[in-house]
Amino acid sequence: MQESPYYLSDNTPVVRAIIPSNTLTRFENDSAIYRIEKTDFFNVETTQEAPVDLGELELDPSVNLEELPIVAVLDSGVMFPESLSSLIIKNWIAPNSSGGDSDHGTKVASRVAFKYINQRLSSSIITPRTRILDCNILDGNVPVNIFIQRIQAAVNAHSDIVKIYNLSANASSPIEGDEMSIIGYELDALQSRTGVQFFVSAGNHKLWQTEFGLEDVLDDDDSRISAPADSMLSVVVGSIVGADHQNSLSQRNQIAPYSRRGPGFQGFSKPDLSAYAGTIILDGSDASVPNDPFSMVMTKNGMLIADAGTSFSAPIVAGDFAEILNTIPDRDTLLSKALLYHNAVALWDVDGMEEEELAFAHNLYGRGISNVDDSKYSSPSKVTFVRTGTLNRTTMERVTIYMPPILAAQVGRNVAKVSVTCVSRPSVDRTKGTEYLGAYIRASLKKSHVDGVTLKHVQQDFKEGRQKWDVCHQFSKPFSRFNAGDWQVWLELFSRWEAKNEDVPYALVVTIEDMSGSLDVYSEIEALNRYRALNTIRLRIDN
């Protein structure tokens, strides 16, 4: 026995022990033991490059810090320079931890608070976008049992005041994918129980040291995501190179040479999103991170250095999510997540892509990069409706949207587009194997008929984004000719095992867009008093 047993959120005891190989058979055949697996260890690595002194930065005095959202950084500690220290609301050290050295954690936190910090440095005044809760949980090479207990303690202590948690630490080896990792499960269980949202790095590999090209790296199974990036309810973030550099395996808008790729658990697409980050260049046997606008992070000494890793992409999206959440009534994390996914910008051209190609793109880049402004606001030619609620197996919801005549009168090819995203938070059960998720919600679109009464089903072209038993059902459909009037989005829940009677929370986002960008669709909907909370008809389903 290495430590005392600890417990997952479903009260399953976990024991970390050294077992001689010649006695493994005895334990494998014990029906009281659910499974035996190698212990993962979690740590963080930092890159030391020639630093740039930022001098005495000052926070923008026009920003009311009390109104900024808070993000918890689960890392090695955060130590901002004195002039920026007011952004840290609390320094918390996990029980039985000696505390980390703050190197990695400060870099991560600088991405949360300032995004790409050097782009905000036109003077000595810097504008923050979030505040930081420092959760110091990494003090070296931490085994998975201790790691889980520290994450549990951080969330239990702060979930009443902080809903966003960034975790930029991964196991060193890729997932197998046939069973959910215990730490992936624990993140899901914590999110289901408390309503918090985790942002998790996809993980880094070192195949760039031995492979000769990006294609070879991606073909290697060792480039698959690592735990806890298999978590189904977390937002998993990978890295995209933001600038071209000679001697880099990846160029601009390609997956970074170190960034792990999908698929995730049971073949589901991972990562969920990506963010621009630094790359690695090779000059003979020497490797370095070049300076560019997407590689620079702040150290605990107030210096600016270049560093690379998915550790510094996850906090970009966590901060973006915080900006969105801060504009949402009641700070609804599920609705903010739906808006984040809904407005992500793809880095590839979907037109003409085969389904297999689209699936491959999703496993490299997720849905693309986040778009904060589109997630926060409608525009004259792009109107977004939102709804939150719960759904169970006995009811079906028909949600009405209005397609205005000004849009239907357009002539041409693909003059309008309707996009639908439904994100849910079903229960999970790690003992169910491939049936890990208890439910999923299927969304479908119905358009009005020329008779003004009948609704016709809209065929969805691609399966990607509409997989069964996923937590997000998403699709877009362009239209060339259609009838104005009330259209509907139908939501139906499918469930299994004990989850059959549960109410599953969901958030729905629907956008109507004039593809020419010239029509004021918003004003027409608003003038007819149709821009309001989505109308819903609840229907009883006979079993």
Image (spheres, rainbow, N blue to C red):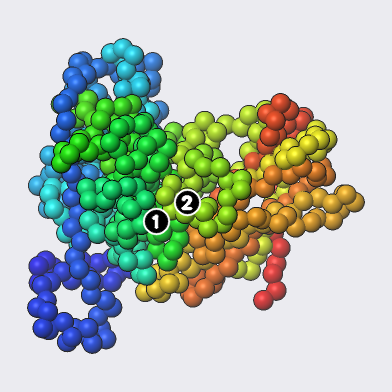
Image x and y of residue 155, in percent = 30, 50
Q: Amino acid at mark 1?
A: Gly
The numbered mark, 2 or 1, whose residue comes first in the sequence reads 1
Left or right, 205 with reference to 252: left
Q: Residue at x 38, y 15 (%)?
A: 62
Q: CA distance from mark 2 to mark 1?
A: 8 Å
The C terminus sits in image quarter: bottom right
Looking at the image, is 486 positioned above or below residue 316?
Answer: below
Residue located at (32% from left, 61% from top): 221
- Residue, disc 2: 362
Q: Quadrant of residue 230?
A: bottom left
**In this orientation, does residue 522 appear?**
no
Instruction: Determine which quarter of the picture holds residue 274.
Output: top left
Residue drawn at point x = 37 percent, y = 70 percent: 178
Percent x, y of residue 482:
80, 45
Q: Amino acid at mark 2?
A: His
| Residue position marked by numbered label 1 in the rendering | 262
- Pinpoint residue 39: horizontal percent, then vertical percent: 19, 65
- Left or right of 447 on screen, residue 227: left
Task: Give yes or no for contact between labels 2 and 1 (Cβ–Cβ under 8 Å).
Answer: yes
- Mark 1: few, some, or many residues within 10 Å (few <14, many ≥20)? many
Above or below, 305 relative to 335: above
| Element class at badge 2 | helix
User: In the picture shown, does residue 171 fall above or below 417?
Assistant: below
For the point 65% across and 65% down, the residue is 395
